[in-house]
Amino acid sequence: MSLRLSIIVPAYNEEHRLGPMLDAYLPFFDTALPDDYELIVSVNGSTDATEALARSYLPAHPALRVTATPSPVGKGGAIIRAGRLATGRHIGFTDADGSTPPAAFLDLLLSAEADPAPGYLVIASRWLPDSCVSPRQPLKRRLASRIFNFLVRRLFSLHVTDTQCGAKVMPAAAWHAIVPSIGTTRWAFDVEMLFKARRAHIPIREIPTTWHDVDGSKINVPRASCQMFLAIVRLRLLHSRLRFVVTLYDRLLGRLLPLPPYAP
């Protein structure tokens, strides 16, 4: 019999932040969904002790599973690979830093289950009026987020406020219909997921969330912003009549800011 929920946690060099996240999530869901959930840590090409740390929790937590990929495959690649192991009726993912508290993640599941029309992809949003974000992110990150969201809305007609919040849940049927075919494994992974969901007529719902900015991010905001912009432009070209331009796009821009290959 399938479990009620599978939680996937992609982890790349997160030996310092994964432990507190597991300390919060595992006891919470042991109580909230006893014997009815699994948490799959998907270690993605880490060079630190992330995998060893995750495995150290296995003896005390039967709901925990750990899978590891020796070479880097990106956040999306780690999520896709772990999704092949998931057995939940609903499957979702969240960040290894614990920025989304377990109670907020449970809200995603409850929202997905409560709707009379099955099949909703439910995503957490930090930008809805009732969301609670603390501490407030630096101005440059908020500005980059809003510019990115504007571009996504214009390029993909995705009318959501927060594509990049790392907490999303959907029924297993929706997951298997869209996630295995996603070819973008880094910056544009979430955008392609939402874009494919819209094209597959899978309804998307945003709900307010609680989100805590956790120290230790390795993101260089200016460089990441450029890479994210190039990634979504490339993705849009791939899903248009101008697909032939991608070869030229990669040849010219890839030398400046190389992007991982698209592999649908």
Image (spheres, rainbow, N blue to C red):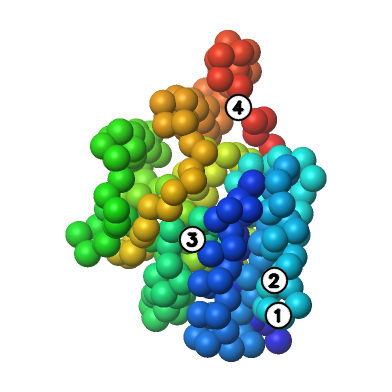
Against 3, residue 148 (above or below) is: above
Distance in Å between CA atoms under marks 4 and 1:
39 Å
Which one is in front in this view, the residue at disc 3 or the one at disc 4?
3
* Circle 2 residue: 57
* Circle 4 residue: 259
Q: Residue 60 carries which label?
A: 1
Q: How many labels does the image show?
A: 4
The part of the image, by quadrant, that contains residue 93 is: bottom right
Distance in Å between CA atoms under marks 3 and 4:
27 Å
The amino acid type found where label 3 is placed reads Gly
Against 209, residue 237 (above or below) is: above
Q: Earlier in the sequence, mark 3 or mark 4?
A: 3
x then y, percent, for residue 18 = 58, 59
Residue plotted at (29% across, 57% down): 133
Q: Which of marks 2 and 4 is nearer the N terminus?
A: 2
Circle 2 packing at 10 Å, graded few (<14), some (14-19), many (20+), is some
* Circle 3 residue: 98
Distance in Å between CA atoms under marks 3 and 2:
16 Å
Distance in Å between CA atoms under marks 1 and 2:
6 Å
The quarter in which the C terminus is drawn is top right
Circle 4 packing at 10 Å, graded few (<14), some (14-19), many (20+), is some
Tell whether label 2 touches label 1 (CB within 8 Å): yes
Circle 1 packing at 10 Å, graded few (<14), some (14-19), many (20+), is few
x then y, percent, for residue 24 = 51, 72
The amino acid type found where label 4 is placed reads Leu
